[in-house]
């Protein structure tokens, strides 16, 4: 049995750049950083960062390029794909995630109204891994 499903969240490491194939179909290469905090046996809290390359196609690519910028939080659903090639006699490979769907994770910025004391507060929707330290 072969199952290839990925769900991952993180923040964009750069602005997504929308490009088009000669056929006119859109694609977008971008990356995210995914942070993980954990406790060592000694009780120290450590953090590791994984940088993941992603590519989206069609309307998904167009919408990611339209609504996201460097630093934006995003939740991705997709599949893993490994490209292999030979360069200067050496075998090379690169693994990335092909995006099937995405979800907005950041809240919409709330504009200040004259009677309100909240200045540009931001509602965030996220999950907290710190509470689940391993």
Image (tube, helix red, strand yellow):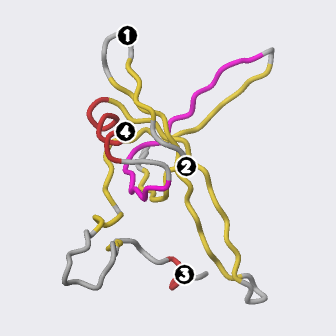
- Label drawn at residue 13: 2
Secondary structure state at the residue bearing disc 3:
helix
Q: Residues within 10 Å of mark 2 (few under 14, many from 20)?
A: some
Secondary structure state at the residue bearing disc 2:
loop
Secondary structure state at the residue bearing disc 4:
helix
Q: Residues within 10 Å of mark 3 (few under 14, many from 20)?
A: few
Q: Nearer the viewer, mark 1 or mark 2?
A: 2
Main SS, magenta residues: strand
Mark 3–mark 1 Cα distance, whole angstroms, equals: 46 Å
Q: Does the magenta stretch include residue 13?
A: no
Side of 102 relative to 79 (left or right): left
Q: Does the magenta stretch include residue 79?
A: yes
Side of 106 relative to 6 (left or right): left
Identify the residue position indicated by label 3 in the image: 130
Please report contact status of discs 4 and 2: CB closer than 8 Å, yes or no.
no
Q: Position of residue 125 (x, y in %)?
A: 34, 71
Identify the residue position indicated by label 1 in the image: 22
Question: Residue at point 64% right, 77% down?
Answer: 38
Identify the residue position indicated by label 4 in the image: 65
Q: Earlier in the sequence, mark 4 or mark 3?
A: 4
Q: Which of marks 3 and 1 is in front?
A: 1
Mark 4–mark 3 Cα distance, whole angstroms, equals: 30 Å
Q: Earlier in the sequence, mark 2 or mark 3?
A: 2
Question: Residue at point 43% right, 51% down?
Answer: 6
Instruction: Using the image as rendered, state which of residue 32 and residue 1 is in the foreground.
Output: 32
Quarter containing the C terminus: bottom right
Find the magenta span and give its range: 71-87
Question: Residue at point 78% right, 88% down?
Answer: 42
Q: Which of marks 4 and 1 is nearer the N terminus?
A: 1
């Amino acid at each position: 049995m072969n199952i290839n499903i990925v769900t991952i969240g993180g923040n964009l490491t750069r602005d997504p750049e929308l490009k088009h194939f000669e056929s006119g179909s859109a694609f977008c290469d971008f990356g995210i950083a995914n942070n993980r905090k954990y406790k060592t046996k000694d009780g120290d809290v450590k953090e590791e960062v994984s940088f993941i390359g992603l590519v989206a196609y069609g309307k998904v690519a167009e919408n990611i390029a339209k609504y996201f910028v460097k630093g934006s939080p995003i939740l991705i659903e997709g599949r893993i794909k490994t490209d292999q090639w030979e360069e200067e006699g050496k075998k090379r490979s690169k693994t990335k995630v092909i995006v099937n769907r995405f979800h907005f994770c950041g809240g919409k910025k709330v504009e200040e109204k004259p009677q309100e004391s909240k200045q540009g507060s931001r509602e965030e929707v996220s999950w907290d891994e710190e509470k689940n330290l391993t």
